[in-house]
Image (cartoon, rainbow, N blue to C red):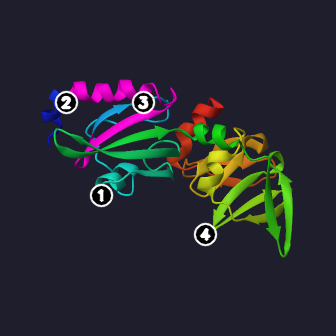
Amino acid sequence: MEINDINFEKDVLQQYKIILEDWIPATASIAIAVNDAYIFFSSGHHQIKLAVGEKVKEDSIAQKVLTTRSKTDAMMDNSLFDAPYYGIGYPIEIAQQPAALVIVLPPNFIKAKQGPYQFLTGKQNEDWTPVPINEITYIESLQKRTWFYVNEEQYKTTITLKELQTRLPSIFIRIHRSYIINIHFIKKITRDLSSNFLVVLKNGTELPISQSYINNLRTVLEF
């Protein structure tokens, strides 16, 4: 189905939207994909943006629904949007063609449902220590393991950065695929010799900010 040929289905798409709005939170977004492209998108969150006509990405909720023709739900990273999201996809038909209806719920939905972490339990050698969340300077993914840092001490946790990002309180923000930082420990944001952004923490640690996360950081810190 060509995108231009879908115009006659607009009423059907709007009906889906109207019906779903009675059942999903106002911050949820709705996407519908046919074949390999999105034909409809209604955003409920400023970080959730998608263009009609955009191709369905590999390993996305929509792609999994179109491939398996079954309901699919998963916590996804920020490869599709500017923020991680929880998606629920349903197989439907549009103009007698297989389609995917995807409900996109932003990270705060998961936080509200489960509650933010109050502490993380970290491992050092053979000891485990519960650490209050606000004492953690930053969290790092390194060699397929997750580490967090408190007063120059390094602890290991089994929780992934993707999982942590959905349940950390708002004082934490992701700046890189490998780093989540505690805003309260930022000394300054600067640039290196190549004009790439860096975060310098109060203990002198320098961490890179990737292009994928700089816009969100600018929005949160208003710079």
Marked residue nearer the N-terminal end (2 or 4):
2
Specify few, some or many for label 1: CA neighbours under 10 Å numbering under 14, 14-19, or 20 or more. Answer: some
Marked residue nearer the N-terminal end (2 or 1):
2
For label 4, the SS is loop
What is the magenta range?
9-38
Q: Is residue 78 found inside the magenta-colored segment of the image? A: no
Quadrant, the N terminus? top left
Report the amino acid beneath label 2.
Glu
Which residue is pictured at 18% across the width and 45% down the height? 97
- Image coordinates for residue 122, horizontal then vertical, percent: 80, 63
Q: Give me the disc on residue 9.
A: 2
> Where is mark 3, residue-wise?
43
- Image coordinates for residue 121, horizontal then vertical, percent: 80, 60
Marked residue nearer the N-terminal end (4 or 1):
1
Which residue is pictured at 55% across the width and 42% down the height? 214
Report the amino acid beneath label 4.
Lys
Q: Nearer the viewer, residue 173 or 127?
A: 127
For label 1, the SS is helix
For label 3, the SS is loop
Q: Are marks 3 and 4 in contact (CB under 8 Å)?
A: no
Q: Are marks 2 and 4 in contact (CB under 8 Å)?
A: no
> Where is mark 1, residue-wise?
67
> Where is mark 4, residue-wise?
144
- Image coordinates for residue 134, horizontal then vertical, percent: 81, 45
In the visual, does 220 lie left or right of 57? right
* Extreme residue in the bottom direction: 126
In this view, the mark in front (3 or 4): 3
Quadrant, the C terminus? top right
Report the amino acid beneath label 3.
Ser
In this view, the mark in front (4 or 1): 1
